[in-house]
């Protein structure tokens, strides 16, 4: 019986380690996402490996994106980064490049139902808000605690079950620009019966804090009264103010 010399044992160990790494199951990716988000975001029914796989994305255990597929880009190692491409339902597309000291997001585009996100703030629950969020960003760079880039979040066909005659409430845009270690947000009304204006701040790995002013457009005061009176009492044409946190 011929014994394998140390070289063959070395090759065998390397081959085994390579196979183990190449076949790391997708559930490891799910564990990483859930841990890094503090349990807020989770991946259900994960299939494949951490290099190529897919899962359903949930927010607070509620389905948000039916399918998220990830694909590792091995050529990125030549540039010293670990890169993935994300594709999926809801028009999801994003490119993630993670290096030793920085993370870059490119060509981000996604559409999400608004209702689950509004459920993050308990004070908004009675308003039963709905519609669709569209997030777009060309390039976002996170280097340590500093930020560069910009992104926009559109709330389209906004609605509330408290309002019957004026739905959809309107279309709105939140522009986010980096400011040192945080994002500064500016909300404006694109169109609609409910006029929204606001500004806020979003710390890295922190919460989005927003000051919001709401009022009914002329002629929509009666229709919007049930919604606005949930936020604060006052004349039908008076402004209401709301401070909330996501």
Image: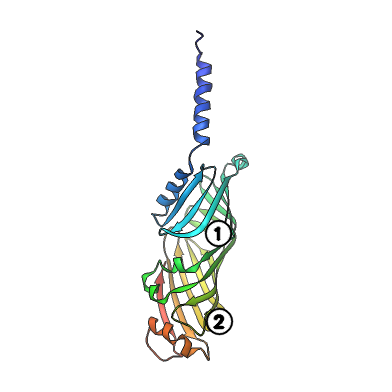
Closer to the camera in the image, 146 or 31: 31
For residue 229, the mark is none
Disc 2 crowd, CA 10 A, few/some/many (<14, 14-19, 20+): some
Disc 1 crowd, CA 10 A, few/some/many (<14, 14-19, 20+): some
Colouring of the image:
rainbow
Residue at the image position 48 percent from the left and 89 percent from the top: 221
Residue at the image position 40 percent from the left and 72 percent from the top: 244
* Relative horizontal placement of residue 91, taking residue 64 as reference (left or right): right
- Callout count: 2
| Occupied quadrant, residue 128 | bottom left
Question: Which of the two marks, 2 or 1, is nearer to us in this view?
Answer: 2
- The secondary element bearing badge 1 is classed as strand
| Occupied quadrant, residue 233 | bottom left
The percent coordinates of residue 94 (x first, y second) are 58, 55
- The secondary element bearing badge 2 is classed as strand
The percent coordinates of residue 28 (x first, y second) are 45, 43
Relative to 190, residue 16 above or below: above
The CA distance from mark 2 to mark 1 is: 32 Å
Q: Quadrant of the C terminus?
A: bottom left
Closer to the camera in the image, 152 or 178: 152
Q: Which residue is mark 2?
A: 192
The percent coordinates of residue 171 (x first, y second) are 56, 76
* Relative horizontal placement of residue 152, taking residue 43 as reference (left or right): right
The percent coordinates of residue 172 (x first, y second) are 54, 75
Relative to 221, residue 123 above or below: above
Mark 2 / mark 1, whichever is N-terminal: 1
Q: Which residue is mark 1?
A: 148
């Amino acid at each position: 019986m011929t014994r394998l010399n140390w070289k063959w044992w070395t090759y065998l160990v390397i081959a085994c380690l390579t196979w183990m790494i190449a076949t790391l199951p997708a559930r490891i990716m799910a564990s990483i996402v859930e841990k890094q988000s503090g349990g807020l975001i989770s991946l259900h029914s994960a299939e494949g490996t951490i290099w190529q796989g897919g899962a359903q994305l949930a927010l607070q255990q509620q389905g948000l994106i039916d399918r998220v597929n990830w694909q590792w880009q091995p050529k990125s190692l030549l540039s010293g980064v670990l890169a993935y491409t994300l594709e999926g339902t809801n028009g999801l597309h994003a490119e993630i490049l993670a290096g030793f000291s920085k993370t870059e997001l490119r060509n981000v585009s996604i559409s999400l139902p608004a209702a689950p996100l509004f459920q993050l703030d308990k004070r908004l629950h009675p308003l039963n808000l709905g519609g669709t969020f569209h997030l777009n960003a060309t390039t976002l760079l996170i280097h340590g605690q500093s930020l560069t880039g910009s992104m926009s979040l559109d709330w389209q066909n906004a609605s509330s079950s408290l309002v019957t005659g004026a739905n959809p409430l309107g279309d709105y845009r939140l522009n986010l620009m980096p400011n040192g270690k945080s994002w500064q947000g500016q909300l404006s009304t694109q169109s609609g019966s409910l006029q929204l204006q606001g500004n806020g701040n979003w710390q890295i790995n922190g919460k989005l804090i927003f000051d919001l002013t709401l009022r009914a457009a002329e002629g929509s005061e009666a229709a919007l009264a049930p919604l606005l009176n949930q936020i604060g009492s006052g004349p039908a044409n008076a402004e209401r103010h709301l401070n909330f946190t996501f």
